[in-house]
Amino acid sequence: MRILKSAAALFAVVLAIGLAGVASATSTADVPGLAITQVGYNAYGADTRWNRNQEFVDVKNTSAAPVNVKGLLVEDQWAKSHRDDNDRKCNTFTVSSLPGVETGADGSVMLPAGATVRAYSGWGRPAASGSVHAVYMNSRCGYNGHIWGNGGDTAWITLGSVSESFAYDFDNGYTVKP
Ligand SMILES: [Ca+2]
């Protein structure tokens, strides 16, 4: 009987780990209307200051209505874990405005339904192209400003009090999608 109970407990643990693995491997829907839909994590060739923009993360409004993304926080796992001691604001970006979107009188920044915020790791001029609103983290941290781990990492978005994540493992490619 004791063995059976232990087996049941072990099974429960395995089940919990399995479910947690599934939850972290795909984009969950904790932030209403938004989802991390793609991470460009592995720049071609050596990582230099000049190819930082081959790294990016896409945050898409997957809902049918505009979403106010003012204050949307984009982080990698390191930044999420070091909010209290990240004086240089490494590996993190906060949306204050978006190219192609007029900031509302109340400060709102409404990302249209179906549109995407693409946060590049490097420097550039924010611009909207079609449904993609490009912003730039201009990272001076990481390795030559490359912040997304090539062997795996977790992207996080936080809006207000809710967060969601998208974890990936080395995929032997340039980008990874859910
Ligand atoms: Ca990388």
Image (cartoon, rainbow, N blue to C red):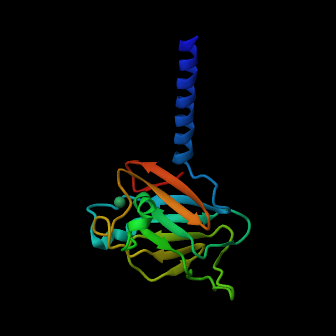
Q: Can you tell which quarter of the image residue 110 is in?
A: bottom right
Q: Nearer the viewer, residue 10 or 91?
A: 10
Residue 139 at x, y percent in the picture: 36, 73
Q: Quadrant of ligand 1?
A: bottom left
Q: Residue furthest bottom?
A: 105
Number of numbered markers = 0
Vertical position of residue 125 compared to residue 59: above or below: below
Residue at 47% over, 64% down: 75
Lateral position of residue 74 relative to residue 140, left or right = right
Lateral position of residue 13 relative to residue 115, left or right = left
Q: Nearer the viewer, residue 159 or 64?
A: 159
Residue 93 at x, y percent in the picture: 47, 72
Residue 146 at x, y percent in the picture: 34, 65
Q: Can you tell which quarter of the image residue 124 is in?
A: bottom left
Q: Quadrant where the N terminus lies?
A: top right
Lateral position of residue 30 relative to residue 126, left or right = right
Vertical position of residue 119 compared to residue 153: above or below: below
Vertical position of residue 17 compared to residue 59: above or below: above
Residue 132 at x, y percent in the picture: 56, 72
Q: Residue furthest right?
A: 64
Q: Nearer the viewer, residue 124 or 67?
A: 67
Residue at 32% over, 61% down: 44
Q: Residue furthest front?
A: 2
Residue at 70% over, 72% down: 66
Vertical position of residue 1 compared to residue 168: above or below: above
